[in-house]
Image (cartoon, rainbow, N blue to C red):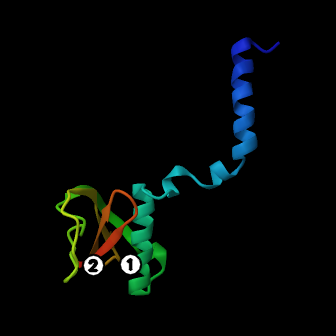
Amino acid sequence: MIERAEMWLLCLMIPFLLFCGTSCVANPISDQPGTTEYMITNARQDLAQRLNLPLDKVILVKIEPVDWPDASLGSPEPSKIYAQVITPGYRIILSDGVNQYEYHSDSQNKIVYSGQN
């Protein structure tokens, strides 16, 4: 016989499985916008395209949190105006096995290529 607590748990799980199904497993949280994994993946894809390399040749060296002094993420473009607010984000260092490349991000989805180190 199923205990009362087990029955409640089962009742809570059934709707989750019916409505979520396999899509919850197929789209793990690490691939969602705003996560560090999402930003690393986008930076790696951008660098692989810039260097015309296979994605597996672009490796993560380091990622560190940074508070950028404004919305330019430390990489202002000439003649552009940026919000003057502290913008939390990340410095992402990637490598092609020879050189290192730096990307800056905010804490959402914006990623900026900052050049070769």
Secondary structure of the residue carrying tag 1 is helix
- Is 4 situated left or right of 40 in this image? right
- Is 40 situated left or right of 106 in this image? right
Residue 110: x %, y % from top left: 36, 67
Amino acid under disc 1: Leu
- Is 112 situated left or right of 30 in this image? left
User: Quarter of the image containing the N terminus?
Assistant: top right
Residue 99: x %, y % from top left: 27, 79
Amino acid under disc 2: Asn
The residue identified by callout 1 is 47
The residue shown at (45%, 66%) is: 41
Q: Does residue 117 appear in this view?
A: no
- Which residue is more in the foreground, 95 or 29? 29
The residue identified by callout 2 is 99
The residue shown at (38%, 58%) is: 108
Q: Residues within 10 Å of mark 1 (few under 14, many from 20)?
A: many
Q: Residues within 10 Å of mark 2 (few under 14, many from 20)?
A: few
The residue shown at (29%, 79%) is: 98
The residue shown at (31%, 73%) is: 112
User: Quarter of the image containing the C terminus?
Assistant: bottom left
- Which residue is more in the foreground, 9 or 79? 79
Q: Is 16 rendered above or below residue 40?
A: above
Residue 86: x %, y % from top left: 20, 56
Task: Say how many tags the image has.
Answer: 2
Q: Earlier in the sequence, mark 2 or mark 1?
A: 1
Q: Does residue 28 appear in this view?
A: yes
Q: Label 2, label 1: how many angstroms apart (C-alpha)?
A: 12 Å
